Image (cartoon, helix red, strand yellow):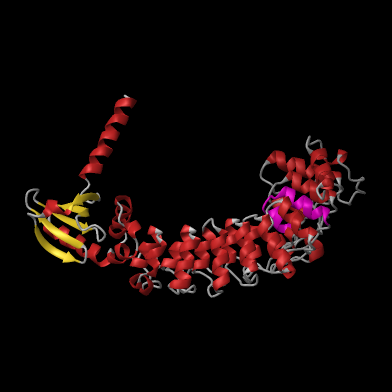
Amino acid sequence: MQFFGRLVNTLSGVTNLFSNPFRVKEVAVADYTSSDRVREEGQLILFQNTPNRTWDCVLVNPRSPQSGFRLFQLELEADALVNFQQYSSQLLPFYESSPQVLHTEVLQHLTDLIRNHPSWSVAHLAVELGIRECFHHSRVISCANCTENEEGCTPLHLACRKGDGEILVELVQYCHAQMDVTDNKGETVFHYAVQGDNSQVLQLLGKNAVAGLNQVNNQGLTPLHLACQLGKQEMVRVLLLCNARCNIMGPNGYPIHSAMKFSQKGCAEMIISMDSSQIHSKDPRYGASPLHWAKNAEMARMLLKRGCNVNSTSSAGNTALHVAVMRNRFDCAIVLLTHGANADARGEHGNTPLHLAMSKDNVEMIKALIVFGAEVDTPNDFGETPTFLASKISRLDTRKAILTLLRTVGAEYCSPPIHGVPAEQGFAAPHHPFSLERAQPPPISLNNLGSHPSQAGWWAWGAASDG
């Protein structure tokens, strides 16, 4: 059955190939001696093919007038007139400027482009066709800065998307294409080049002009933001060599924040190497440093080795450790702690990292914070201690494990202050299994922090995480 299915598909494809009314075919002009000429523009002729009851568009070969190319064969006169008008307005610069156009395959490609992109200028078509001689034609030169209706892009945008350096040179040097024109998304040719795969195109753009190099698109991203977001390290290098600015603010901050958000280590390193002050830059939304945006141990370690302040705070007062705990980034938190992060730093609403770990029911994170000196009895702005938050954990097994751990290190139980009651009364400890007076905590070690089989592993990893 599979064989017959493939056979049917093959026969269908062959049938479509020969029944396609727009299939380009080489013909002899003498075959149309008895046909009426309905329209004629330069080398393009529309014949009424009476024997076949069709309307045929023929491009006469200017280098061999006895031969030509049938560009379409349509049954309706109205359709034939529309397509003839479209072809006659676009084809002339191509067959006049280059003999390479006068081949069946090239003409097929060109006529398909004309029909599929009716808003493209001859310069757009020339870019897709990729024949350099065409860019010396006056019609193509005159359209070098035209924008099409689909995306609002210029021929230079298309050349950058294709990654065609030779065509880019033709557009810039012979056609004087502008580099600061933006498309419907606000993107310049530099944005397009970054999204391509050819860094040489970006180098050519940077050598010829810098207009548009630092332009933000409709999303507020410069080409450097975009390169960091996409993780295109070579593009970042070229942009920086072209003097792209690192201090232009985007929706998530500077380009380095984009690199951190998407965990693009190489891109972040290049930016810091070019402008070391970027390591201390703050994003507009949270007032956070690049370290706050670190999502894994590798990114955090890279920033810390370059001098990033481990206890830098955001607008809300949170440190990078607060963020790592909130996001359950255990490996990242261990790196921060081993590099001196304050385990008792008070952030938003007076919460310490340990408060946040309690709210996340993260037993391993709680153990790590306690090992690194986090206080278990520090109240937040609502009077809630980590111990109190632990007592409210919904999962029974998790709550029992954490409360046992806290009792091991001598935690007190304190209820939060009651509105309208003096603070000393609000903090009175009710009857509770914990001792009402703080016990002298035993020395903290892995043995008395529980019997989790992975404790020795994460402690040894954390201690050696700095390499």
Identify the residue at image location x=57%, y=59%: 199
Q: Residue at x 43, y 72 (%)?
A: 175
Q: Position of residue 466 (x, y in %)?
A: 82, 50
Is 63 on the left or on the right of 175, as rendered?
left
Q: Quadrant of residue 286?
A: bottom right
Q: Quadrant of the N terminus?
A: top left
Foreground pick, 158 / 451: 158
Q: Is residue 327 magenta?
A: yes
> Would residue 431 be seen by someone viewing this image from the given angle?
no
- 185 lies left or right of 213: left
Residue at far top of view: 1
Query: Residue 399 or 119: which is nearer the viewer?
Result: 119
257 is higher (above) or lower (below) than 7: below
Segment colored magenta: 321-339
| 184 on left or right of 383 | left
Q: Is residue 344 left or right of residue 221?
A: right
Task: Estimate the x, y position of residue 448 in percent, counting from the top left.
Answer: 87, 40
Q: Nearer the viewer, residue 34 or 198?
A: 34
The relative height of residue 393 versus residue 155 in the rendered view (above or below) is above
Q: Position of residue 176 (x, y in %)?
A: 45, 74
Report the predominant secondary structure element of the magenta stretch. Answer: helix
Q: Residue at x 29, y 26 (%)?
A: 4
Residue for point 73% across, 51% down? 297
Residue 420 in picture, x, y percent from top left: 72, 67
